[in-house]
Amino acid sequence: MTVYQNPELVALFETYTGGPSGIGADLTRVVAAADAGAPLLVATATDLVLYPGNGAAPSVQGFRMGTRGFKELAAVSHLGPAMASLVNMRRIDPASDLWRRDAKRLLAATRTARSANTPSLWRDRIAVEAYRGREDAVAGMLDYGCGLTIRYLEAVVASEARLTPEFLRRAVLEAESDELGATVPFNWVMIATFFLAGLDVSHRIIGWLADRELDWTRTMVLICGKQGRPTSGVTWTTNSVAQMILAASDHELPLDRLYIAPHGPTFVISDPGDLAPVRAAEGELRALWSYTRAISDLSPTMFDGYPRYAPGACTPPVVTERTSELSEMPAIAGPDDMRAMVTRLRMVQEDPRHLLSGCVADYAAEQLRRNGNDPRLAVVPGLDGVVYPAGL
């Protein structure tokens, strides 16, 4: 069905918004030209790119999937959801044997991974700078996590009646009973592994940006493309990369210069030595930032005298024993505040706005910010000061 459009009024509409020839596009070009010398920092799902300005060569810092230790830590972080998935699969379809096949597959993979996990693996092969000095503790914690998972899987395969939420929480996640020999809640293992991943990424981002001595009051920041789940990371408080960049700036970056564009242009760096795709994207990325800024800057011209928009700082709620629900991530009082951190574990899984790996990434970045980006001075919750039994 053809919709009638009046050509004269459509022509007027297109005079302002008619693509590259419209007045809006001209304004974007003027703003982009005025900011051509300003640094532009762009984060994709896997990389940070800094365009210094005035056509200078960009530099790149990879920070996620290709980094050392990330998948190895995530493998153990994900054992908690994997065990819970088996429970829900049986609950939803009790007649199916799929959960049992997956349990046996997970059991075999966990046994193999456990045998490969050693302090020397973490010290000599994975060799993450941010973990230096903690390799024995990391390997011991992962051994415990794998061992407890193996005991759980053996127990539920042998007795299907144990495949319940209550048994999983009691014997594994909360370690409230010694039925499987648990002495430390598996929830703590998940918190520690997520924190370690955030510690490494934050350490490298903060150090890399510090070396560039940016004037944060002039820096243009874009976070583009999909971040984790399709629904996650679209606001300042739910995007862990945004929190790391803010920490790297020592909170000098104004919030109104940081834009999150989930549908924005992105690129893939398949060869770190070939930055042609990165260079090619600069113009479009600068235009996106400038367009967003140009529209915002029309407001004081048009509406002076009316209340203006100001980015508000979110005050995280405090979790107490009486708290039953939250809409934002709770504040963490310190490295022993496990109630807040386990609540965050639940929130990043339950709230589709959040990145699953971001439950304590902001806390890791903030510890580094306060300690001169020295990972040795950070306290890793669930690891530092916790004794994991060997040979479970």
Image (cartoon, grey):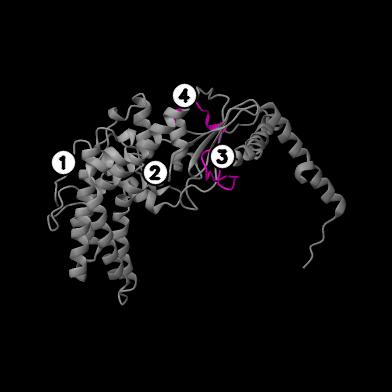
From the viewer's side, name the closer residue of 354 and 306: 354
Residue position marked by numbered label 1 in the rendering: 387
Q: What whole-number distance in Å separates the C-alpha atoms at marks 4 and 3?
A: 22 Å
Q: Earlier in the sequence, mark 4 or mark 1?
A: 4
Residue type, numbered disc 3: Asp
Label 4 Cα crowd, 10 Å radius (few <14 / some 14-19 / many 20+): few
Q: Earlier in the sequence, mark 3 or mark 2?
A: 3
Residue located 58% across and 27% down the image: 52
* In this view, the mark in front (4 or 1): 4
What is the C-alpha distance between the residues marked 3 and 1? 46 Å
- As drawn, the label of residue 44 is none
Q: Which mark is residue 358?
A: 2
Viewer-side label of 2, 1: 1
In front here: 174 or 19? 19
Instruction: Name the residue beneath numbered marker 3.
Output: 274
Q: Tell whether label 1 touches label 2 (CB within 8 Å).
A: no
Secondary structure of residue under mark 1: loop
Query: Start and end of the magenta stretch?
Result: 247-274
Instruction: Specify the amino acid type for callout 4.
Output: Asp
Distance from label 4 to label 2 (Cα)?
25 Å
Q: Earlier in the sequence, mark 4 or mark 3?
A: 4
Expressed as whole percent of the image width and height from the top left, the position of residue 308 reads 60, 31
User: CA separation, marks 2 and 1?
Assistant: 25 Å
**Residue 56: image x %, image y %?**
61, 28
Q: Residues within 10 Å of mark 1 (few under 14, many from 20)?
A: few
Q: From the viewer's perspective, is residue 83 above or below residue 315?
A: below
Marks 4 and 1 sit apart, C-alpha to C-alpha, by 37 Å
